[in-house]
């Protein structure tokens, strides 16, 4: 089965989509924060590995995260670039608006239960 989305690449149903959260979730460990340049270097490595989606950060969390995501969206072309977002009015649309220079903008919306 082939899935075709207007204006987007064709996907086969036997294709495994690699969604990497290293740039966002990797910073949840104490002492593991990355600079924008370190995130960009990692994003290039993930692109070279063929990752399909890179969750680059949490745009609403800080200006630093937003700046890193903006830098990555301008430099990376093959993978879709995602930003984590709360399932709250304005939070899901803002990362996509901020990533408007990205060829594949995407927001991963979450709803906290705790």
Image: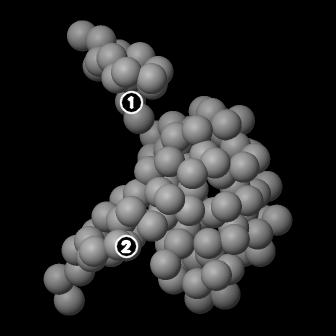
Of the 4 image quadrants, the one containing the C terminus is bottom left
Of the 4 image quadrants, the one containing the N terminus is top left
Residue 80 appears in the rendering: yes
Q: How far apart in space, not on screen, are marks 1 and 2 (Cα)?
A: 28 Å
- Residue for point 51% across, 83% down: 61
Which disc number belongs to residue 79? none
Check disc 2: other Cα within 10 Å, few if <14, some if 14-19, many if 20+. some
Residue sitting nearer the eye, 24 or 103: 103
The reply, left or right, for residue 91 in relation to residue 57 is left
- Residue for point 45% across, 67% down: 94
Instruction: Name the image quarter holding residue 45.
Output: top right
Q: Nearer the viewer, mark 1 or mark 2?
A: 2
The reply, left or right, for residue 92 in relation to residue 50 is left
Looking at the rendered structure, the secondary structure element under dot 1 is loop
* First reached walking from the N terminus: tag 1 or tag 2: 1
Q: Which residue is mark 2?
A: 91
Percent from the top left, x then y, of residue 67? Answer: 69, 71
- Residue for point 41% across, 35% down: 17
Question: Is the residue under label 2 in contact with that under label 1 (CB below 8 Å)?
Answer: no
- Residue for point 17% across, 83% down: 113
Q: Which residue is mark 1?
A: 16
């Amino acid at each position: 089965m082939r899935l075709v989305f207007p204006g987007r690449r064709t996907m086969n149903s036997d294709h495994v989509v690699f969604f990497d959260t290293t740039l966002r979730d990797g910073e949840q460990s104490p002492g593991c924060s990355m600079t924008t340049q370190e995130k960009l270097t990692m994003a290039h490595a993930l692109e070279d590995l063929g990752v399909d989606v890179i969750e680059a950060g949490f745009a609403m969390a800080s200006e630093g995260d937003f700046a890193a995501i903006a830098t990555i969206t301008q430099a990376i072309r093959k993978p879709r670039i995602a930003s984590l977002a709360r399932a709250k009015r304005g939070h899901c649309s803002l990362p996509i608006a901020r990533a408007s220079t990205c060829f594949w903008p995407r927001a991963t919306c979450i709803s906290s239960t705790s």
